[in-house]
């Protein structure tokens, strides 16, 4: 049982299929970690809210992922079967987003409280007078 888990957890170098792809993915994840560490965030611990400030890189990366996925879907439908894939671009962008999210998650637990949500205010109690 332990040997099976070791093979799953620690595959050999040849079983990784494309070491160059994984190298770029690791570099992109490290870049995402750095970006997430330097990102300006506000955290409301009581409401469990997190607001990044001026973080347009995530929006651009998500749009890039959608665009590359659409190209990946459209190429096999329109061209020959031996077209190059968008695997490298998809992997790099996804790894960047995973690294950035991990860094923000780790930082959010240690950030100071910022009030991002107004506290719920109860309506005034009825004074006992019947309406109308």
Image (cartoon, helix red, strand yellow):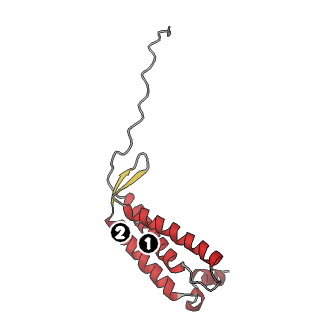
Q: Tell me if residue 96 comes above or below residue 105 in the rendering.
A: below
Distance CA(mark 2)–CA(mark 1)? 9 Å
Secondary structure of the residue carrying numbered label 2: helix
The image shows a total of numbered marks equal to: 2
Q: Residue at x 58, y 89 (%)?
A: 12
Q: Tell me if residue 27 comes above or below residue 59 in the rendering.
A: below
Furthest residue in direction right, as rendered: 1
Q: Residue at x 45, y 79 (%)?
A: 26
Callout 2–callout 1 Cβ contact below 8 Å:
yes
Where residue 19 appears, as percent x and y from the top left, is 52, 88
Secondary structure of the residue carrying numbered label 1: helix
Furthest residue in direction front, as rendered: 78
Which residue is identified by label 1?
A: 96
Q: Is residue 53 left or right of residue 25?
A: left
Where residue 74 appears, as percent x and y from the top left, is 60, 73
Q: Name the image quarter holding the N terminus.
A: bottom right
Q: Residue at x 50, y 10 (%)?
A: 131
Neighbourhood count class around disc 1 (C-alpha, 10 Å): few under 14, some 14–19, many 20 upward: many
Name which quarter of the figure residue 77 lies in.
Answer: bottom right
Instruction: Looking at the picture, tell me which residue is in the foreground, 128 or 95.
Output: 95
Which residue is identified by label 2?
A: 35
Q: Earlier in the sequence, mark 2 or mark 1?
A: 2
Q: Is residue 47 left or right of residue 115?
A: right
Furthest residue in direction bottom, as rendered: 14
Instruction: Looking at the picture, tell me which residue is in the foreground, 93 or 74.
Output: 74
Neighbourhood count class around disc 2 (C-alpha, 10 Å): few under 14, some 14–19, many 20 upward: many
Instruction: Looking at the picture, tell me which residue is in the foreground, 52 or 120.
Output: 52
Where residue 37 appears, as percent x and y from the top left, is 34, 67
């Amino acid at each position: 049982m332990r040997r099976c888990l070791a093979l799953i957890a620690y595959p050999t170098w040849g079983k990784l299929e494309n070491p160059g792809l994984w190298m770029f993915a690791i570099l992109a994840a490290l870049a995402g970690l750095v970006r997430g560490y330097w990102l300006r965030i506000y955290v409301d611990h009581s409401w469990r809210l997190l607001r990044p400030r001026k973080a347009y890189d995530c929006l651009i990366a998500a749009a890039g992922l959608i665009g590359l996925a659409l190209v990946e879907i459209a190429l096999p439908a329109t061209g020959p079967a031996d077209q190059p894939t968008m695997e490298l671009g998809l992997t790099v962008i996804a790894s960047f987003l995973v690294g950035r999210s991990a860094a923000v998650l780790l930082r959010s637990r240690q950030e100071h409280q910022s009030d991002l949500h107004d506290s719920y205010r109860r309506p005034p109690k009825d004074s006992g007078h019947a309406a109308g």
